[in-house]
Amino acid sequence: MSLRKKALKFLKWIAIILGAFIILLVAACLISPKYIVDYIEDHDREWINRDITIQKFSINPLLFTITINGVKVTEPDANSTFVSFDRLFINLDSWPLLKSQISTQEITVENLFGNIVQNGSHFNFSDLLDSDSDSDSNTESQEETSFTLKNINIINSSIQYSDQVIGSTLLLDSIAIHDESFSGNDTFWDADIEIHQPDGGWIRGNTVYNLKNSDYKINTAIDNWQLSPFKNYVTSVIQLSQFEGRLDTHLSISGNTGKSDYFKSNGDIKVSDLKIVDPESKPLVTMETFRLDIDSINTQSNLYDFNKILVDNLHIKYEYLPNGDNFTKWLVQNDSTQVATSSTQKNTSEYYVSPFEMLSVYIYDMTRDYIFKSYSADSISVRNFNLKFHDYTLEDPFYMDITKLDVLSLNIKPENKHAYFDINGIINSTGKLKGDITVSREGIENMDVDLSIKGLFLNRFSPYGRYYTAHPFMEGITTYTTKSSIKDSYLKSTNNIFVEKIKVGKKRKTNSGYSLPMKLVVALIRDLDGNVSLEIPIEGPINDPKYKFGKVIWKVIKNIFVKLATSPFRALSNALSLNEDDLENLYFDSGQIGLGKPQLKSLNSIANVLSKKPEFVIELNHLYNIEYEMDALAIHTAKLNYLKQSEIPLSDKIPIRKQAHDIPTTDPEFLTYVKNNTTNFDPTISIPENVRRLLGEEKIALDLQQVIAKQKELVSNYLTQEKGIDISRFTINDISKEEISVNQTRPKFEVLFKLDENATQLPDSE
């Protein structure tokens, strides 16, 4: 049944009820109100298949008023309330009654309660709206009913809505509806409506509905409407512990209930303080503000004109896990999500999504629904977007933070062939992202990208370096620029990477199957200042599911490096002296509590300088990332315990700590050990997190403090006791809490040489 027919049928019900009241009024002089109540209660099941109880029914024949108190209508099973109200007051006009017309001066309903229950397409009142042969035969006579209802009021009422499929119950209270007048001859129903939400929100507005052609017009203001009561609708798709936020709108909406393609609107929509938290109480998405200012929407003329689209202070945490990610792991499993999850797992095992690919996906999601042939906007703005991207699918965890990302596009007009987006942001605290993207009106299949990232610490990408080259990136400050063009879904991209003071670590074991002679290659291509410059051309069809930008760029780098390594040239003779490296940094392995050859080599070089240059003092800045060290120490301790308990033969020539260090974190037997010994093992989180559960956070933190203190003690004692350096000649500073320490993937002492103002001055040079 259409909405228009249902509305007409509802009004016919009102006419029938009012007609009954007229009859009752006439009969009131001869029949007592108690008889009327008894008659209604005796025939209620016959009429509506529900029980009706009335506490009090009174008619004043002199004032032509009817008052009904304490009415309750049950559900068909009589176990719960369908409708109830405390008081219904009707003040009838006397003269129209003489003409067999219904006319009221006032109709007021107080404390009306309605219980709506939906189960799929069926409602608990569907039986009252269903047409039958009797109602069809009486349609013509009902339509001729003459009535005029004035001053219609519903006061302090409430509605309870339950969705049995979702398992959600919503309550709306303090409902007030006022209609000045409505008659059988009117084609418009016009009412002022006010609805309150128990959590604090209000809806206030006016609704006009044309009963003749089903046109409607709504002017509404929504203030502080809480989203948390709608949590069950979201959790039917994804499991969450929190879903919060509020909605504020001022909208004018018009359309037709029978025409889905007829819709007009203007006004503004604002969502504030959005918070989406997973079942482990970890925030997935938080957002301060989303604002959509609508100048005009008209679906018939295909017009979508926005004044402003704003996303402010959006935070997203995205984690790649061995079996998916931190979003898909919480999806409620059904046929569609199982397909999506299995697809995600397959793709994850084949490739990783690069940070730049993540950025392009974000821009795609932001623009695809707005930049079409008829869309326009004065501005699209994203302010202070923050993305935490963690990848636990590699040999070592990878962490990247994109912060303070701003995206702005102005004056998007239908007559313009392109939309322009300016982008600015910070990557890993130091890398400055800047650029612009030009998107065609036809969609992102045609676009140009011009981006640069400056000041990015290369060692934060060490997990990818180890995975794809078997060598970690130790040092380097990176500048990345890309100029890319997509035409008809085909990408042509020029990528330039410039790394200052690049340093690559020793080759390490890896299960990835990738291995490149990185140290040789870097020595070949870096200049006298220790810098490396690479140009990486990329091209291919972006709509090909097998073509992945992140995977392709590593393949190109591999081809370049292999070619360099197999073609020695004069660049090798310009390699920098390793002695200089020894003076710049003193590296330790995570958890190391003894001096090895690398440390002794650096300390001997430092002591040699201090002995020969008495005018110099040095600062040794101890840098380490606490979270990295906690993870590394936990893994290393677990590997030691694993070796001691396993039947693996140990070498007498290699220290057990070295043997434990050489065990890949992804070693199947080691992973089995962790799983079997961790009482609360969780396969959906990273191995470091499970190991920290196994050993205990407090113990690991205490062990880390002892390791850090021991490293300082080793350095100080060697310089003073073994090399005879006066303790006043050097200072050891712990700057682990400084911003720069965030970028450390292993402990080190950064060596800074300074002049000692109090030292004996050297003779002036001639």
Image: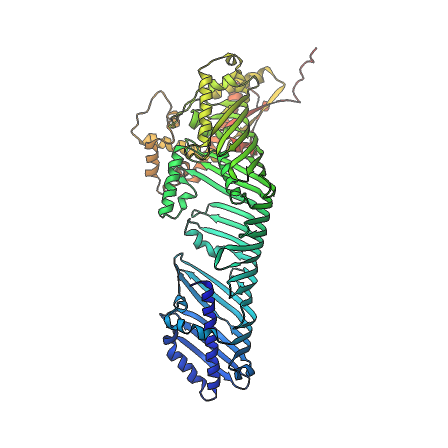
Residue 17, given in percent of the width and then of the height, sits at 46, 76
Give residue 77's quadrant in the image.
bottom left
Residue 657, quarter of picture: top left
Which residue is at the front of the view, 60 or 754? 60
- Residue 78 seen in the current view: no
Residue 344 lies left or right of residue 408; in this view the side is left
| 388 relative position to 120: left or right | right
Q: x and y percent of residue 197 in the render?
A: 52, 61
- The residue at 50%/71% (across/down) is 111
Which quarter of the image is occupied by the C terminus? top right
Task: Give whichever of 438, 595 is nearer the camera.
Answer: 438
Q: Quadrant of the N terminus?
A: bottom left
Residue 81 drawn above or below residue 723 = below
Residue at x-position 39% and y-position 69%: 75
Disc tally is: 0
Q: Residue furthest left?
A: 647
Nearer the observer, 470 or 248? 248
From the top left corner, tell me how far across and down residue 709 is, in percent.
Answer: 49, 31
Colour scheme of the rendered structure:
rainbow
Q: Position of residue 66 (x, y in %)?
A: 51, 81
Instruction: Tell me where residue 660 sits by quadrant.
Output: top left
Residue plotted at (57% across, 32% down): 450
The residue most toward the bottom is 30
- Say whether residue 490 is visible: yes
Q: Nearer the viewer, residue 219 or 117?
A: 219
Q: Is residue 664 above or below residue 217?
A: above
